[in-house]
Amino acid sequence: MEECERWRHEATFPAEPASVSRARAFVCRNLLHQRLWHLVDPVRVVASELATTAVTGAGSSFTITLWETGSRVYVAVRDGPSPGVREGSAEPGARHRSRLTVVALLSQDHGERPDGHGGSEVWASFATTPVPA
């Protein structure tokens, strides 16, 4: 049985350092609005890591999407091709891997896929029900 999307919020930010804090605020505001208080901290950190990777790696504007489907909340950051940089160029490997390690530790699941136009989307999912400590 296919699960329905319950809600979705999306925002696009320019490739500048201040956009990372704006992405965090976007995530916090929308999770609080949905009364998903237990997800604010982990999703905010993951959103920050993904936005930072988009700003420093791609150097292009990025779109952050937050949505709930079934028993999971998803956050995804989609960036565009880097201006003036050849396709396939990216943030230095160790720093990028370190950010994805943080994403892996805080999320239930995560993944990355190219968009076919020189950009990519990185996503992570979180359980809507708090996990007992």
Image (cartoon, rainbow, N blue to C red):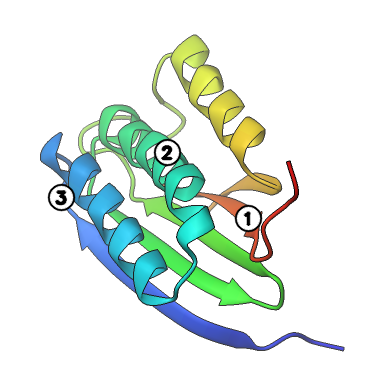
| Residue farthest to the front, as pictured | 133
Location of residue 61 with respect to 48 vertically, above or below:
below
Q: Secondary structure at mark 3?
A: loop
Q: Secondary structure at mark 2?
A: helix
Which amino acid, mark 3?
Pro
Label number found at residue 14: 3
Q: For the residues marked 2 and 3, what is the alpha-carbon distance in whole angstroms?
A: 19 Å
| Residue at point 33%, 45% (across, down) | 81
| Residue at point 41%, 66% (across, down) | 31
Residue position marked by numbered label 1 in the rendering: 125
Q: Which mark lies nearer to you, 1 or 3?
A: 1
The location of residue 6, given as percent across then percent down, is 56, 86
N-terminal of the pair, mark 1 or mark 3, is 3
Label number found at residue 45: 2
Q: Are marks 2 and 3 in contact (CB under 8 Å)?
A: no
Mark 3 surroundings within 10 Å by alpha-carbon count, few (fewer than 14), some (14 through 19), many (20 or more): some
Please tell me in which quadrant of the rendered image residue 45 appears.
top left
